[in-house]
């Protein structure tokens, strides 16, 4: 892997959520620029090599994912140039047998030397405190009162933060939920009950399958009277709980 271009990553300062002393300790947190699914990867590869067929790129990505996963689950340590990975075990031995729930398998990833070298070469730009840019400060499941990034399908949900107001034409602006398989569900405009810069109140779709999602907000909102030419985007990971009628 070689340096093809100078990369820059913008970060914000924020209170340390696990800090104790000193009380005003702060950390850096990256400004996340949304999420790239497989189709975004295909787009990026085609931009580098326009002569390639889209279907061919999709097939190669799918085949690599399949081969890497198969090798990992057979106990092979995999180095694909970007990361090194292997299967590891979690939980103590009790009774000399593998106990479902107590013992678990997980994947351990770490960057390769080439990837670590690329990280070292990134230029970091401090954009100020987290409150100075669009961000999601907190979430609340209105059916349970939980603020731990869980949400219940078919129930009310609140986002608080800065510059969150949804402004601009669909589908360029709006809210989408993307599951871990890359399937996206758009939040209908009629299900957004409160749309303010510091707060959004919405009803989540009943049809959501329980699991991990990324909620992505895109907006052209600006404090001034003008509308931004380029949308701004912010994301937050959620755990969707099953819909419970009644």
Image (cartoon, rainbow, N blue to C red):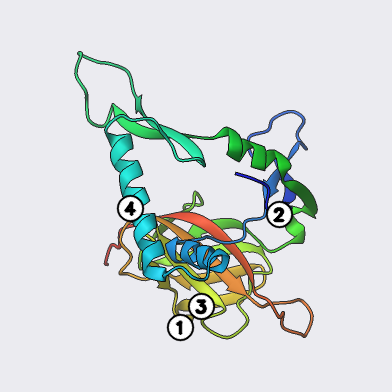
> Which mark's residue is nearer the viewer, 4 or 3?
4
Circle 1: is it few (<14), some (14-19), or many (20+) Cα within 10 Å?
few
The image's mark for residue 63 is 4
Mark 2 vs mark 3: give the one in front.
2
| Disc 1 secondary structure class | helix
Residue under numbered circle 3: 193
Q: Residues within 10 Å of mark 3 (few under 14, many from 20)?
A: some
Q: Is residue 101 above or below residue 136?
A: above
Label of residue 5 in the image: 2
Q: Is residue 135 above or below residue 116?
A: below
Would residue 153 be seen by someone viewing this image from the given angle?
yes
Q: How many marks?
A: 4
Q: Is residue 29 left or right of residue 243?
A: right
Q: Nearer the viewer, mark 2 or mark 1?
A: 2
Disc nearer the start of the sequence (4/3)? 4
CA distance for labels 4 and 3: 43 Å
**Is 164 placed left or right of 209 in the picture?**
right
Residue 31 % position (x, y): 67, 55
Give the image location of residue 45, x and y in percent. Answer: 51, 63
Quadrant location of residue 100?
A: top left
Mark nearer the N terminus (1 vs 4): 4
Residue at position x 68%, y 76% in the image: 230
Residue 127: x and y in percent read 79, 55
Element on which disc 3 rests? strand
Question: Residue 242, percent across and down?
Answer: 30, 58
Q: Quadrant of the N terminus?
A: top right
Identify which residue is drawn at 32% across, 69% down. Answer: 206
Contact flag, marks 1 and 3 (Cβ < 8 Å): no
- Tell me: residue 153, above or below residue 166: above
Asked whether 42 or 204 is in front, the reply is 42
Q: Which residue is mark 1?
A: 190
Circles 2 and 3: CB atoms closer than 8 Å: no
């Amino acid at each position: 892997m070689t340096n093809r271009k100078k990369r820059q990553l913008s970060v914000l300062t924020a209170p340390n959520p696990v800090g104790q002393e000193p009380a005003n300790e702060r950390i850096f947190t990256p400004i996340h620029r949304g999420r790239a699914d497989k189709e975004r990867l295909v787009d990026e590869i085609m931009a580098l090599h326009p002569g390639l067929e889209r279907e061919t790129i999709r097939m190669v990505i799918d085949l690599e994912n399949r081969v890497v996963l198969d090798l990992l689950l057979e106990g092979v340590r995999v180095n694909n140039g970007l990361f090194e990975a292997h299967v590891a075990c979690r939980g103590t031995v009790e009774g000399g047998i593998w106990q479902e729930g107590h013992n678990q398998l997980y994947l351990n990833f770490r960057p390769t030397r080439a990837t670590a070298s690329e990280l070292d070469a990134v230029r970091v730009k401090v954009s100020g405190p987290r409150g100075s840019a669009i961000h999601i400060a907190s979430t609340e499941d209105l059916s349970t009162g939980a603020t731990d990034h869980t949400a219940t399908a078919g129930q009310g949900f609140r986002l608080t933060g800065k510059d969150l107001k949804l402004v601009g034409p669909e589908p360029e602006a709006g809210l989408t939920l993307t599951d871990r398989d890359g399937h996206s569900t758009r939040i209908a405009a009629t299900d957004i009950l409160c749309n303010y810069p510091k707060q959004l109140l919405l009803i989540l779709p009943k049809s959501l399958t329980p699991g991990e999602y990324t909620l992505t907000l895109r907006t052209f909102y600006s404090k001034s009277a003008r509308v931004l030419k380029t949308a701004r985007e912010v994301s937050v990971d959620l755990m969707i709980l099953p819909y419970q009628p009644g």
